[in-house]
Image (tube, rainbow, N blue to C red):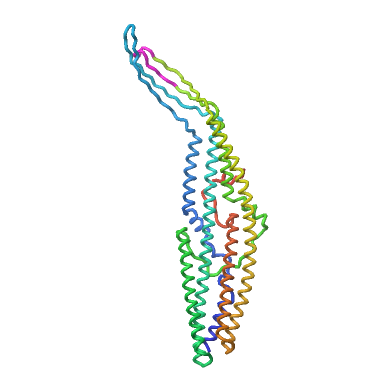
Amino acid sequence: MNAVHRLTWALALAFAAPVFSTAARAGYLPDPAAAEAALLASPTVAQARGELAAQSLKSESLKRGREEWTVGTDVLQRRIDAPQDRFTEWGVAVSRPLRLPGRANADRALADALTAHAGASLGEAMHESGRQLLALWFDWLSEAGQAKVWLAQVAIADQQLAAVNARIHLGEAPRSERVNAEAALAQARLQQQQAAAREQRARSRLVAQYPGLPVAADDTLPPPALPPGTADAYVDAVLAHDHELMRARRKAEMLQAEARQFASRRSVDPNVGVFYKNEMGGNEHLVGVSVGLTLPGSARRTDQQAAEQLSATAQDAAVRLEQRIREEARANFEAAVAQAANWQQADRAAQALAEGARLAARAYSLGEGSLDQVLVNRRLALEGQLMAQQAQVDALSAEARLKLDSHQLWPLDAGMEDSTHAHP
């Protein structure tokens, strides 16, 4: 009866607690330094970093001013009828538009606003990439846990078959039980193969998106904890760091600065230069100063009005976005609380079903009950274990999402200017 006793102990160990149930609170998330490096290397973040660098150069150009020197020359021939004579004449002129102080200040303000908007876009790209990393990571973590559960089930089913063969050999069980045991083993192997394939696909998706990220985690997961603090405190923390909201606010500020720049351009544009002319075949020399004024037309007024309209629209959009983010943050907090409670209930149910499977296996080892009853209890315990494990992964994922959105998980501001975090 050694095979029967080994089966009893295997069932007791397999269903005593869900896989990933008790361990130190570490090791199930990517290393922060590795996660930061993976996020910075992701395509969307790399593009946003390049756009920020390019916008910084454009803003510097805008601050310096785009007024440039103009050099002109002319060559002509003068003809005098009485007395008849011809003279070759020529001239050269150098001029440049002047940028008035008000326009220079408006250009500098717009340059700063453009850079801040690009920095906020980088922060949003980092945040969104972090959310995607978490989703792919926990998807892999869930599939890896299920693969381990089914691998343990294959070992249990194999031991179950050995126990059945032992009882048949002793004349304590009919030969028909071997068919049921072999079928259970075949099903467990099929499920294990499918779970291993799902884990490999999840790993491949994660590695394809973040190739430099080490994909490894502890064999056990910590019990999910209720999120600390209150929902209001969490909502405030999210609003203080949400990059999508920052980007919307920076866009409104950028459009407002652009409207002020258009307003500064509604005045005349002065152009000052100097010129030299050689006339009458070199007998006359002229040196002078030229002043020109470009009079603004109606297009500048409509450009300003359009920018003001876009700025007002962007401000309204930022207000609506803040309200949506506030509601989503509160919903995420409440969902994390509910998922932690769901895991506790699922864990209690899994432990009760595991105890039922253990008792059924123990009774079978003592010659009581039937193999069908053992298989039924084992299947129920397995379903309970898988449900508890998924509930645990979901709760830990919700907990990690809360920390990510409140900037308590990974650094999401790498390469960003501090000005992008200033509130209007």
Characterize the magenta stretch by its predominant secondary structure. strand
Q: Which residue is drawn at 62% across and 51% down?
A: 324
Question: Is residue 420 rendered to the left or right of residue 272?
Answer: right
Position of residue 407 measured from the top left corner of the image (x, y, whole percent): 58, 54
Quadrant of the image for the C terminus? Answer: top right
Q: How many marks?
A: 0
271 vs 192: above or below = above
Q: Does the magenta stretch include residue 282?
A: yes
Give residue 214's position: percent from left, percent from top.
Answer: 47, 62
Q: Choose between 109 and 267: the one closer to the eye.
A: 267
In the image, residue 103 sits, relative to residue 319, either above or below, namely above
Residue 218 locus on image (x, y percent):
53, 68
349 sits left or right of 169 in the view = right
Q: In the visual, does 323 lie left or right of 152?
A: right
Inspect the magenta stretch and tell me whether residue 246 lies in it.
no
Hey, which residue is sitting farthest top in the picture? 83
Q: Looking at the picture, how far across and down is residue 138, in whole percent?
A: 53, 63
Tell me the residue at 58%/70% (across/down): 387
Q: Which residue is drawn at 49% across and 53% down?
A: 40
* Residue stretch in magenta: 274-284
